[in-house]
Amino acid sequence: MSIAAEETKDSSSTIHAVIQRVNHAELLLDNKDKWAQIDLGLVVSLGFSGSVEEPLTNSTDSPSIQAQVLKCVQSLLNLPLLTLGVWGDGSPPQTVLQLLGAKHEVGLMIIPQAALGASLKGTNQIRYASQLPVAEARKRYELFQNVLRREVLYATNPEAKRSVDLAALEARKALRANTGLDDFFKTGVWEGKFTQYDTEGLPTHTAEDKEVWS
């Protein structure tokens, strides 16, 4: 599975994922005597490729990168890849979220794999031209982990999502009160540029009476 950021300056950015269904898997960590293991679940090899158009410290703040990661995470959680029986015995395939919702334990083992973004050159060479720098790839991997944890939490605990949404609403109200959003787009450099506004003070129509977001 490969998912690319679309129609933005990050359009060359791609997430590559190889997903394997397992009943049990073990992984040796850092080539040392420490193992990670899961039972029923998915092993996901994850790679990132593309170009970096902005400083590394800000790249994961890019809306297109965040949307790209969210799309990949949602696909992972909603693809019907798992069964409780033996594959081929007629048991219906289910998604990770379906099994978690039914109180089954599901393991997710996410393995960074930079080589997934490589391509063949001829028949005997491998090209890594689009491979991201290590620091950037690590940031996107960490972003993927955080989004995955968040989406699983929201899906299995709706009350947690409601609490986060409420906190975000209160923060927006506080920001609006501090910045005077009602008048922000009516004064200064914006004065005379808009004719209509929504209930939060955001402009909806330009001075030529054209919709701002059309």
Image (cartoon, helix red, strand yellow):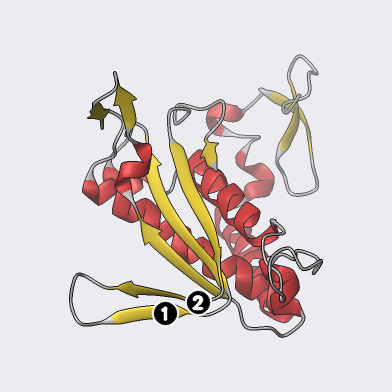
Q: Mark 2–mark 1 contact, CB under 8 Å?
A: yes
Q: Which residue is mark 2?
A: 24
Q: In this rendered view, identify the residue nearer to me: 203 or 47.
A: 47
Instruction: Give left or right: position of 154 versus 148.
Output: right
Classify mark 2: residues with Cα within 10 Å, few (<14), some (14-19) or many (20+).
few
Mark sitting earlier along the chain (2/1): 2
Instruction: Give left or right: position of 65 versus 207.
Output: left
The quarter of the picture where the N terminus appears is top right
Establish if 128 lies above or below 109.
above
Residue at position x 81%, y 66% in the image: 90
Amino acid bearing label 1? Gln
Amino acid bearing label 2? His
Q: Which residue is mark 1?
A: 37
Where does the image place residue 98, in percent across and percent down from the top left? 75, 71
Classify mark 1: residues with Cα within 10 Å, few (<14), some (14-19) or many (20+).
few
Q: How many marks?
A: 2
Residue at the far front in the pictured view: 89
Where does the image place residue 165, in percent across and percent down from the top left? 68, 68
Q: In this rendered view, identify the residue nearer to me: 178 or 161.
A: 161
Establish if 110 lies above or below 122.
below
Residue at position x 46%, y 43% in the image: 16
Quarter residue 172 falls in: bottom right
The quarter of the picture where the C terminus appears is top right
Establish if 198 lies above or below 12.
below
**Residue 11 in view in this figure:** yes
Residue at position x 53%, y 59% in the image: 20
Residue at the far top in the pictured view: 208
Q: In this rendered view, identify the residue nearer to me: 121 or 99.
A: 121
